[in-house]
Image: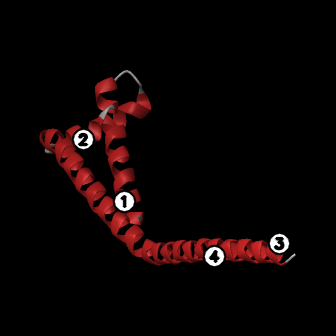
Amino acid sequence: MQSVMYELMSELNDRSEDLERQMLSLEQRVEQLTAGFNALPAHLSATLSAQHAALVQLLRERDAKVLSPTVPSALSPTAASLPLANPPSGSGSGSGSAPVPTQPIEDSPNTSSSSC
């Protein structure tokens, strides 16, 4: 009877030690998760700032590419006003309607980047 009790106590102690190790491991993982969650806002802020700066740079480069070919056509104010008058009166002037959608499309990403 004493040997059975000794075996049971020994097994109970082994399981208790295993449970203690598992609890210690879980506590360490919780501490790591807590530290990660606490650092998350700073990481998100840095990442979003970097992405915003990259997006702004890309938009500026795109605007520079788009605006440089249109500068000669935009030099004459009458030429710029004619395509605006042509699309409502007729859809036959496809070359006149192409610059009009391009400019609002450029403005909307710039507007959305400003709102970010």
Secondary structure of the residue carrying tag 2 is helix
Which three-letter amino acid code belongs to the residue tagged 1? Ser
Q: Earlier in the sequence, mark 4 or mark 3?
A: 3
Question: Mark 2 or mark 4: which comes first in sequence?
Answer: 4
Q: Identify the amino acid type marked 2.
A: Ala
The residue under the point 37% across, 21% down is: 92
Q: Which residue is mark 4?
A: 17
Give how far across and how far down residue 48 sits, in percent.
Answer: 37, 64
Residue type beneath disc 3: Val
- Quadrant where the C terminus is found in the figure: bottom left
Residue position marked by numbered label 3 in the rendering: 4
Front residue of this view, candidates 71 and 48: 48
Q: Which residue is mark 2?
A: 80
* Residues at marks 2 and 4, CA–CA distance in whole angstroms: 83 Å
- Whether tag 1 and tag 4 are in contact, CB under 8 A, the answer is no
- Nearest the viewer among 8 and 26 is 8
Q: Identify the disc placed on residue 65.
A: none
Tell me if residue 27 comes above or below residue 71 in the rendering: below
Q: Residue at x 32, y 32 (%)?
A: 98
Q: Residue at x 69, y 77 (%)?
A: 13
Which mark is first along the chain, 4 or 1?
4
On residue 113, the disc is 1
Crowd tier of the residue under label 3, counting other residues whose Cα lies within 10 Å: few below 14, some 14–19, many 20 or above: few
Residue with the most extreme top position: 92
